[in-house]
Amino acid sequence: MTSGSVTSATARRELLKEVYEQARGCIACQLHETRTQVVFGAGNANADLMFIGEAPGADEDRLGLPFVGRAGKLLDQLLGEIGLDRKDVFIANTLKCRPPSNRDPYPNEIESCSGYLRSQVELIAPKVICTLGNFSTKLLREDSTGISRLHGRDEVRTIGTRAIRLLPLYHPAAALYTPSNLQTLRDDFARIPDLLALDPPPQPAPAIEPAPAIEPAPAIESAAEPGPETQRAPASDGRPEPAPGTEPSPVAGDAQLGLF
Ligand code: URA
């Protein structure tokens, strides 16, 4: 199952790796101080189906991969029940860094990180996005309606330059703790194959100026003016330079991306 966009599979992977390299050195919010590593996302860069969760937890922070803990096992199981596995999909999160003690993401963190997610969506160009839980649903819908009202109802949304079918789902972690949520999640998952079988929705007219594939990361956010340690000249493309000592190694991240 692969996307039919004009971007070639190889070009898409390479561009995605560039975004990953940028994210690896990101210091745009306070989470860079406590993360073990950036959890960029993993899976098939040419997938028609993308899942977007909330934020890495302890296991993800340790291993550098999304959804590798208990919620991830449930996600794998639900994928299997509809005949898919991880090599068919791309899995990312709203935040690329773990919030301490798994607290909820703060608005400034979501805002700081959103450029990476938008670049991922733009490059992967999935036919269907399943948001998992409130944070990714609210971000992509640009609306505060909660997941309990929206789950299982697909709609077409313009995200970046594309119209994409969006299917909000309960977060698997919520289903782990509440059996009735698990059955609801399973029922909603069962809708995915039908959505994937549909033709892509009509696309918006292309902008005169093509949108850049990689959006600039937002400026460093902090309560006060950034101090000299965090204030650095932007790169020529406007994105912040990596923090000293966090410069990505020259070997790009096939391992973390898990590109199949
Ligand atoms: N929960 C998430 O939202 N993302 C992960 O990667 C793991 C748990």
Image: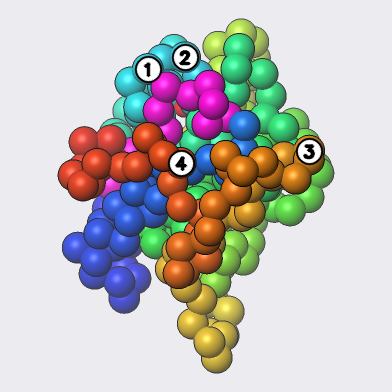
Q: Is residue 159 left or right of residue 255?
A: right
- Indicate the amino acid at tag 1: Arg
Give yes or no for contact between labels 1 and 2 (Cβ–Cβ under 8 Å). yes
Depicted 96 relative to depicted 216: above or below? above
User: Which residue is label 4 attached to?
Assistant: 243
Q: Are marks 4 and 3 in contact (CB under 8 Å)?
A: no
Q: Say which mark, if any, is on residue 207.
A: none
Give the residues in magenta.
31-45
**Mark 3: few, some, or many residues within 10 Å (few <14, many ≥20)?**
few
Q: How far apart are labels 4 and 1 at the CA level?
A: 21 Å
247 relative to 250 in the view: left or right: right
Label at residue 62: 1
Residue drawn at (58%, 29%), measured in percent from left and top? 31
Name the one closer to the observer, 1 or 229: 229
- Find out whether residue 38 is within the magenta segment: yes
Q: Is mark 1 within 8 Å of ligand 1?
A: no
Q: Indicate which disc, 4 or 1, sits on the residue closer to the N terminus.
A: 1
Q: Which residue is mark 2?
A: 58
Looking at the image, residue 215 lies above or below residue 96: below
**CB within 8 Å, label 1 to label 3:** no
Regarding residue 5, the answer to whether it shows in the image is yes
Name which residue lies at 46% across and 52% down.
241
In the rendered structure, which disc, 3 or 2, sits on the residue that comes first in sequence? 2
Query: Is residue 211 or residue 30 the one in the foreground?
Result: 30
Residue type, mark 3 in image: Ala
| Quadrant of image for the C terminus | top left
Is label 2 or label 4 in front?
4
Question: Where does label 3 land, which residue?
Answer: 223
**Measured Cα–Cα span from mark 3 to mark 2:** 26 Å
Ligand 1 neighbours mark 2 (CB distance < 8 Å)? no
Q: Counting other residues with Cα less than 10 Å from the Cα at mark 1, is it few (<14), some (14-19), or many (20 or more)?
A: some
Question: For the residue labelled by badge 4, is the local secondary structure a helix, a strand or a loop?
Answer: loop
